[in-house]
């Protein structure tokens, strides 16, 4: 049974590659460990969209291009203002990107240069949409992005309304690098399917955001935080995990379709989670997460995925739980848009087939006789 398309090659890409048995991930040939330790998000954006690591001038051009495009058009701010305050940030983000696409009326969806320019615009504005909606729902006015700052800095500034500290910016930058691209995951596939109908890049990213939000995909990080906070202390972890497994419930942040060993992004997020939690006086949260990791591995042989340690990291940074999945989107926008450009450059409609399980020959029954 081909349910879930497991193992099916549905696209060709030069953007990233995973070896799930060895726990390897590369973006255009560069190991995720090197990128996590040395690259900034802007370097990764250039790598994914332009095909190579930038030199110093190109890196500064990418940073300023993103910062210059980060302010939102009035139509987007006013649209966000109209949303009910109880709307989830993920719905607001989906709406915000849709509004951004409506604010480009002369956009030629099939012109590759215009799509590339729109890709930068989308990557630049998603962090601003996240911050603007969070502040509006809290009864505060959005703050304008700093044209001299990086994406990670402006993302935190937009949420907090003030200047973030250097360590939080470094942690966020690393999280953005780690989530940027991951082969044909569900949301990226959704983006490529949309692009393959010769639709536009904004619509493709809206499809991707809707797909990312589910708890089997990017929505898992919010569920991890909920779970960790529901456990009173490190000593309770074992009993809580066992009870959950006995009820046949999934433990979010564990397991992966592709990795059969530890997700290579996990250790970097674990390292940052420990640093930030210690500094914030939230050691207990980190210790609980470590113990959950141990117990689930012991009971089920399951490894953590990218969503596990991002949850205590963002919690320790003081970021509201329902903003975690939008942060994933802020980063993955780089991968989504790079895949859309790749699809557009060599397009063929993506249209698989299905196995029919229904009746084949039924007698027509007139309405009055049913
Ligand atoms: N907790 C408990 N059991 C899990 C599990 C988890 N997080 N992930 C997988 N399993 C178990 C399943 O129950 C199943 O067991 P069974 O064969 O006895 O029924 C087996 O492992 C295979 O799971 P399956 O759902 O078929 O794997 P998949 O490749 O379709 O799913 C995920 C991959 C990611 C959807 C799955 O691991 C999951 O639901 N994880 C939790 C959500 C999550 O963290 N998502 C973020 C992914 S980056």
Image (tube, helix red, strand yellow):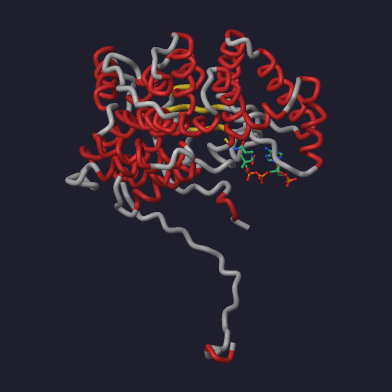
* Quarter, ligand 1: top right
Using the image as rendered, state which of residue 114 and residue 282 is in the foreground.
282
| Residue at image point 48% right, 9% down | 167
Provide residue 1's location: percent of width, then percent of height: 63, 58
Task: Give residue 303's quadrant in the image.
Answer: top right
| Residue at image point 30% right, 22% down | 144
Provide residue 50's location: percent of width, then percent of height: 29, 28
Provide residue 57's location: percent of width, then percent of height: 24, 14
Using the image as rendered, state which of residue 358 and residue 33 is in the foreground.
358
* Side of 158 where 58 appears, left or right: left
* Side of 324 where 92 appears, left or right: left
Using the image as rendered, state which of residue 31 and residue 257 is in the foreground.
257
Quadrant in the picture for the C terminus: bottom right
Task: Give residue 74's quadrant in the image.
Answer: top left
| Residue at image point 46% right, 36% down | 89
Task: Give residue 19's quadrant in the image.
Answer: top right
């Amino acid at each position: 049974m081909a349910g879930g398309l497991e193992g099916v090659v549905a696209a060709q890409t030069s953007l990233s590659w995973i070896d799930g048995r060895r726990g390897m991930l590369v973006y255009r040939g560069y190991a995720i460990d090197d990128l996590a330790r040395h690259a900034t998000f802007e370097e990764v954006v250039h790598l994914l969209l332009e095909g190579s690591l930038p030199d110093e001038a190109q890196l500064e051009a990418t940073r300023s291009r993103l910062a210059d495009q980060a302010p939102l058009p009035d139509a987007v701010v006013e649209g966000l203002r109209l949303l009910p305050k109880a709307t989830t940030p993920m719905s607001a983000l989906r709406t915000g990107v849709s509004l951004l696409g409506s604010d480009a009326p002369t956009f030629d969806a099939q012109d590759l240069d215009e799509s590339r320019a729109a890709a930068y615009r989308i990557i630049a504005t998603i962090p601003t949409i996240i911050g603007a909606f969070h502040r509006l729902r809290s009864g505060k006015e959005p703050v304008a992005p700093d044209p001299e700052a990086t994406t990670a800095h402006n993302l935190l500034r937009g949420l907090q309304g003030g200047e973030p500290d250097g360590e939080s910016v470094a942690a966020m930058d690393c999280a953005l690098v780690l989530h940027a691209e991951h082969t044909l995951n569900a949301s990226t596939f959704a983006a490529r399917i949309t692009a393959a109908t010769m639709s536009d890049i904004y619509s493709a990213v809206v499809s991707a955001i809707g797909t990312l939000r589910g708890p089997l995909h990017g929505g898992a990080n919010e569920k991890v935080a909920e779970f960790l906070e529901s456990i009173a202390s490190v000593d309770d972890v074992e009993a809580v995990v066992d009870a959950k497994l006995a009820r046949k419930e999934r433990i979010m942040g564990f397991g992966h379709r592709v990795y059969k060993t530890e997700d290579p992004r996990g250790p970097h997020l674990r390292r940052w989670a420990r640093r930030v939690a210690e500094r914030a006086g939230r050691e207990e949260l980190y210790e609980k997460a470590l113990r959950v990791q141990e117990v689930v591995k012991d009971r089920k042989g399951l490894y953590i995925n990218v969503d596990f340690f991002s949850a205590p990291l963002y919690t320790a940074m003081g970021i509201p739980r329902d903003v975690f999945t939008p942060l994933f989107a802020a980063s993955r926008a780089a991968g989504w848009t790079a895949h859309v450009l790749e699809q557009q450059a060599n397009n063929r409609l993506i249209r698989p087939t299905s196995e029919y399980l229904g009746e084949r020959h039924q007698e027509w029954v007139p309405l009055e006789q049913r």
